[in-house]
Each structure stands twice: as structure tokens, then as C-alpha cells.
Image (cartoon, rainbow, N blue to C red):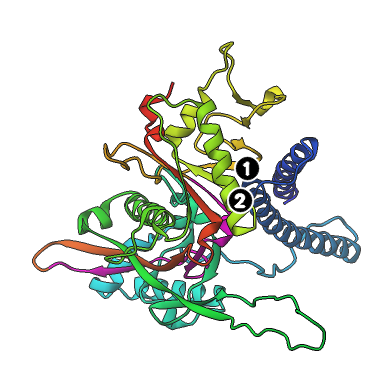
Amino acid sequence: MSTFLDSLRAKRDEKTGLIEAIVTRAAEETRDLTEVELTNVQAIDLEVKKVDERIEQMADIEIRNAKAADLAAKVDGVETRSVAPARVTYEEPTYHERGTHQFLADAMAAEFGGAYEARERINRYQNEVRLEKRDSTSSNFAGLVVPQYLVDQFAPLRRAGRPTADLSTMRPLPASGMTVNLGRLTTGVTTYVQSSENTPATESSPDDTLLTVNVRTIGSMFDLSKQAVLRGTGVEDQVIGDAIRSYHSKLDSMIINGDGTSGDHLGILSTTGINATTYTDASPTFAEFWPKLVAAITDVTSNFYGSANAIVAHPSLIGCWLRALDSSNRPLVVPTAGNPVNAPGSYDRPAYNSNLQLLGLPVIADANMPTNLGAGTNQTAVIVGDFNEAYLWEDAGSQPLYVRFEQPDGNVAIRTVVFGFSAFTAGKYPAAFSAITGTGLITSTWA
């Protein structure tokens, strides 16, 4: 038991060390935590709390075992060892990484084979989900809820992911209805100067406008042979996992590029009223792009009366920035490990999440950013903005996704449908965002 406790404590020390490293680096650079750093700290802190709970449980059992052994030794007059009855304080969910039963195989057996034990496990898991998500009702679960370990393990990996979606302000999706409504004060109160004493104040008429945001459905459908499900190894991990990854990438792409028609979200780039900066350049360079970036940030400040908190760009364009050199062939954007002085930007390492910063703002790499804009369908874009003013409604904070199983006529196969609901808008304060576009953002032409 003590060995297991030691491993838990070592794990806790490792997690707290990561938090301390992030906070220490921000302190050394005399700045506040970036949005990415704050998100990482919050996620690691949640893991630490879970480890603390497990340590407390295991320590309680060990203390009681020791007391029982000591009491037995006093009664018998000799040293003995006994085990006190254990009190169950935590139980693994029905489906988890180390489990012996597969969610997909059980779902198919319960749906089409009438297998009692499989149906009992499926029902037990659905009840576990409802108990865990106490603020949701059974009406929220239109299909079977995908086990969380599949979501955690696969959603962030090997696809573009949802970097921009995760910058948004998250809201729970209402339990019913296909629209979400926001009130916007579009005509404010006007203040006047009193022309002379003892005269009435001048009246003004404030007015609001209803912003209606449509709830959209994102889904995928695929067929699997029964042989693959019942006799294959790791099928549910690979196939459902990939469907979940595809779901999140599609949602992120809609948030950036959607035109609001045919079931699409109205994305940031298509939102009426955002600031626009055009960068026209046949031979673009970092030095020539820099004023455009400053202008886009200034537009947010001037028109929104607020501050941008992030820059979103395609990884290929970020690569152009990283390879930019000065007149002495020295890189302009440099690694933080070198303690740069007077550098326009810095980063941890060349990676999808490199912690790159320009003008003090985190640069988020998102491969869902367009690369087919302009007359030649070869331009990308840059979005600068206060992403707290992008609002994303999802079921229970992006989960659960749902699955349904059908049996195609005449085929020894299972048809699986994975789907989810969401609503998004950047239209509450469009001026909180700026888009940089133009021929200067053809990445192949960068010097």
C-alpha cells in the first residue's frame, strides 16, 4: 500500500512542479499568465485535486489497517497482521481504459442481439452519466453517451483539433429549442449638455436588437462489419475515436469559416461588422507584415474599446514568421530559452502548440484556418481579437457526443451515427475581432 501511496505522491509532486514552472516563468518575465498558460494551470490543478482525493482514500485505508494490526497484537500478545474491512469510496465506471468490456461491442449486442448482460452494462453506464451530470436530464441524452475515456484519449490527437473553439466563452446549450437568443443594446442613452439653468434634460431613446443564434447539428455516419466489431481488437478506439476527432475539427472549422447557411455556423470571418485589414504584397516579409498586425490590434482597441487577447493563424504562416531573418541573417522570432532581448516575438519550440507570442499576445496555431482565399484560392488569413466575445454553446461544455446504431438492410454490418449540437456567435460585439487578408498572405511568396 505504501508503495502505491508513494507513487501517488510522486505523481502529485510532478503535477505541482509543472504549475510552479509555468507561474515562475511568467513571474520571471514580469507578466501575467497567457490564456494558454492559464488553461494549462487549471487543467493540471484539476488533476492534482483528483490525485489528492485518491491519496486521502488510500491513506485512510492504510491508517485503519495499521490500527487493526496494533489492536490484534495487543489482544493476542503476539505481533499479528490483520486487514480491516475496506470501505469502497471510489468505483471505476462501467467502461474505462482498463475494462474488459468494449462499449461498441456491448452496444451492438444489446441493440441487435438481445444480450441481457450487455444491455445491463449499457443501461448502468447511461445511469452513471446521468448521476455524474446532475444538471442534465434524461431528455438531454438522445442516444448513447460515448465513454469519456474515448473522448479524452482521442479528441485532441492527430487532427487539426479545436484550438479556436477552445478560446471561446463556453456556455451550456439549453435543454430544448433550436435557437439561442441574446439581447444587444444597439442604441444607447445619449448624454447632452444643459443649455441653461432650470431647463429640462434632453430625452433620448435607447433601443436593443435581438441576436438569434441557430443551434446546429454536426454528425458523421459509418458502417462496420459485425466481424470487425465482435472479433476485432481496438476497433472502437480507432473508429469512434476518429469520429470524435473529426467532429471537433469540423466544429472548429465552422467557427472560423462558416457562412451561416445550409446548417453551418456563422463563423468569425463571415460575421458582419468585424474589422478588416488588407495586406497587399507580391513579396511579403515579416517587417512589412508587422504594421498590418499592429493595425488589426489597434482596430479592436479603437472600435471595441477593449483589448485583443489572442492571434489565430495557420501553422504554415506561423512558419513564415519563424524563418524571418534580419539584415545579419539572425532570426527575428526566437526561442524563449535564449532569453531574447528586444525581439518582436518568442516561442518555446517549433510545434503546433509552440506558445508563440507576438506583441505580447499568444499566437494560436490552427490548421482549420483557410488557405484558399482570394482570386487565386491560395491566401490564408489572420484573426486578431478578444475571443472572450466569441460564444459557444455545447452540451455540458462540449460533451457528451451521442451515438446511435442501426442495421443496414441485407448487410452483416452496423451503421453508427455520431452527432452533437452546438450554437456559436461572434456577433455580440463584432468589432472585438479583426481579420487580416490579402495577397501578402500567400505563404509560398514569403521571403
The dot on residue 361 is 1
Query: Is 303 on the left or on the right of 398, as rendered?
Result: right
Q: Is residue 389 magenta?
A: yes
Residue 145 position within the rendered picture, expressed as x and y whole percent measured from the top left: 41, 69
Q: Which residues are magenta?
A: 383-408
Query: Is 301 on the left or on the right of 320, as rendered?
Result: right
Please identify the residue farthest to the left as the structure is shown.
410
Give the number of marks. Answer: 2
In front here: 190 or 201?
Answer: 201
Frontmost of labels 2 and 1 is: 2
What is the quadrant of residue 418 in the picture? bottom left
What is the quadrant of residue 192 in the picture? bottom right
Q: Which residue is mark 2?
A: 308
Query: Mark 1 belongs to which amino acid?
Result: Leu
Gap between marks 2 and 1, in whole Å? 8 Å
Verify CB contact (< 8 Å) between mark 2 and mark 1.
Answer: yes
Residue 310 position within the rendered picture, expressed as x and y whole percent measured from the top left: 58, 47
Q: Secondary structure at mark 2?
A: loop
Query: Mark 2 belongs to which amino acid?
Result: Ala
Q: Residue at x 42, y 61 (%)?
A: 272
Query: Is 34 on the left or on the right of 377, as rendered?
Result: right
